[in-house]
Amino acid sequence: MPIVYDGATGVFHLFNRRISYYLGLSEHGLLQHLYFGSRLNKIDRRSMTDLGWDWSETYLGPDDVERRRTGFYSDRSLMELAPHGANDKRGAPVIIRYPDGSRLTAFFYRSHRIYTGKPDLGMLPCTRAGDSEATSLEFTLTDQAGTVECRLTYTVFENLDVIARNMTLRRLTDSDIRVLRAYTLELDLPESTYDLIHFCGDWAQERFLDRAPLHDGTQSFCSNYGRSSHEENPFALLAEPSATETTGQAYAFGLVYSGNFDFAASVSKWKTTRVLLGLGDFDFEWSLGEELVAPEALLAYSNEGIEHLSHTFHDLIRNNLIRYPAVAKPRPLLFNSWEGTLLTFDTEKIIRYIDEAARIGAELFVLDDGWFGRRDTDDRSLGDWTVNEGKVDLKTVIDHCHRRNMKFGLWFEPEMISYDSDLYRTHPEYALGGRKVERSLSRHQLVLDSSLPAAVDCIFAQMCAVLDAYEIDYVKWDHNRSVAEIASAATPSGEVYHRLVLGTYDLIDRLESRYPHVFFEGCASGGGRYDLGMLCYCPQIWTSDETDPIQRLFIQYGTSFAYPPSTMGAHVSKSAVTGYTTKAEIALFGTYGLEMDPGGLTDSERTEIMKVNEIYHRYHCDVIQNGTFYRLRSPFETNYAAFMSVAQDRKTALVFFANILKENNRFRFLKLRGLDPVREYRIAGDQSVYTGAYLLNVGINLTRWLDEFTSFLFILEAVE
Ligand code: DGJ
């Protein structure tokens, strides 16, 4: 059993072959953190908790006078669920407001149980694991008065160096209990010499890497945009300053959630580090009815650099998070109409697009925005999900697609409502913001109040009507503005942000259950909601509206720290900094699709695309979709971007290299990763045969003149 409890010492040990997580009960029943790192079969709890002062303070209560000098001083102990309002000032994960106004929040151990498998979170997305894959430890804790229960669960995975942490708060009495903060994750580390790496940006510049040393005080980032956001991502790393892709200790933190979140890393006066991650507490006040289930948090450890953390998350996402059953199967080559047509099209134009898309190899045609209501401009019709037959004869279009052996996909933006829509005219209360306040428009639209079950039901019924009437294989699920004015017709404002997300999860969950054959792709003005929550429902997410290939290198590179290429919506588009071959090769390291006016392509551009299509069909599924991804050169730190993917059997690999600024002749070798050192590999177009060991230790020779934006794609195949 990979979770062991030693009743004599009050210590719990969660482990797999490579990692150990130790926690213990303090004499007072608080949960103390002891260790998270490489596998250790034994620890010395005394030495870990006796921090050398000859004075110490006990935690609470009059009878504690007798218990001084216990070596437990909550301010400098490492904690699992630090109390709020006591002498520990490093920030607490949970804050409750009691009916008398008090916010003193502390949870004490009552019982625990250990079981195989992993809990499911009902209406919240989460990782899944069978009985042979994971073991869980569930604590039941209550506050001192027995008013609120906190169920804290840790799951250790057999083959992944990650711990999942879940938390549910439950009211045990009738009193008016308000939850002001409910962060799922706290990790206290006994050191502070770490770099914080997080992924920030903007529209068309998502997940740019930022790495800086931790220093005294709190370094934090969050989203209060109502979605996980372009601006920050609910994923971060702490790494030893010297840690590289392949060396050093590092931790990764991820939240399975698509709304507001908070991340904080606080360096204390004792030079410990406290990491907190969870549901954003911006404008959050939750009246605790029956229970509040907090989003799942994941924390991973590596003693062999950052790459291993990415691999852990990539595998977890592909095998334990995404629900779509055919996630590992080859995906049809997608063509999207948006950049070609925008909102201006009719049946004839779409038929022509389908024919031309077929000529460049498309196998799935996606009709983007513009097919519904009176949507000829983007200031109207969101919420009116009925086909605009006068504009596009959808049945004819779909039949045409299917006759050409292409699948058909349709765009929706279910969580939005236009002022100029029948839905708004009939149900103005479905728009967030209330009519008394001045509402900020963004892309001329309002946010649908999906905290209202009636609004969700209404959109569900409309979407079902379309999905029932037409043969649709794919849905693109967009979300084109962030949330502002959170006044709701019925939901208390402190609950709106979270209930909006719950409404969204409910809607997509119901649709997926009803249409299990439909493939859902997420999107939010590009990559504004690229997170573990949406990935549970959407095996791929549109990574960014930026399709300039060089910008894309940065975006996809940053995204790859948490998320595998198989999830990164990436299209070859018209954007013109490089030729089509480079653009297509970069898209290949995502999901690969096409998006432009296909009729506007020259013959030679078409040929360039078709060549990469061949590579897509031959290698993508084994090597990129289901293979292992390695970052070789960072565009954030060097003049290059280089990465590669290796098939699981290590017989085939694709390697991409690009430089940004021009470089004269110079020695330049690109050492590869992940190959089998004893195999021999042939590189397509190269006469020589190289051993894996040679390519790992010497690398591919790139000693040559490089004009700006020169790129190479190397295809390696093992020689049998
Ligand atoms: C934003 C998306 O990122 C685009 O791909 C496109 O679907 C537009 N919305 C449509 O409005």
Image (cartoon, helix red, strand yellow):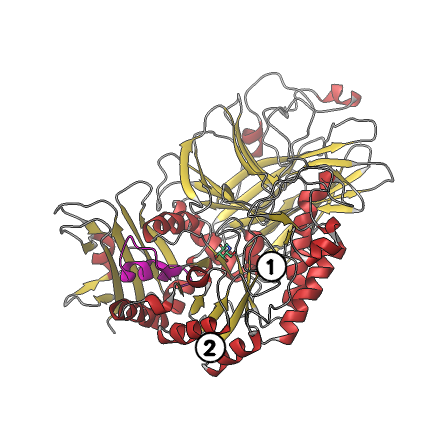
Residue 372 position, x and y percent, is 60, 64
State which region is magenta: 571-592
Which of the pair 577/278 is nearer the observer? 577
Residue 404 position, x and y percent, is 45, 81
Q: Is residue 123 a member of the stretch shown in magenta?
A: no
Residue 16 position, x and y percent, is 52, 52
Q: Residue at x 72, y 40 (%)?
A: 487
Q: Residue at x 26, y 52 (%)?
A: 658
Which residue, given by chain and number where applicable, does mark 2 sit on? Answer: 406
Q: Is residue 588 a member of the stretch shown in magenta?
A: yes
Residue 220 position, x and y percent, is 53, 32
Which of the pair 62/581 is nearer the observer? 581
Q: Is residue 33 left or right of residue 66?
A: left
Q: Residue at x 53, y 21 (%)?
A: 269
Q: Of the residues under marks 1 and 2, which one precedes in the sequence?
A: 1
Q: Nearer the viewer, mark 1 or mark 2?
A: 2
Q: Specify the amino acid type for callout 1.
A: Arg
Q: Which mark is residue 128?
A: 1
The quarter of the picture where the C terminus appears is bottom left
* Quadrant housing residue 75: top right
Q: Specify the amino acid type for callout 2.
A: Met
Label 1: how many Cα within 10 Å (few below 14, some 14–19, many 20+): many
The quarter of the picture where the N terminus appears is bottom right
Label 2: how many Cα within 10 Å (few below 14, some 14–19, many 20+): many
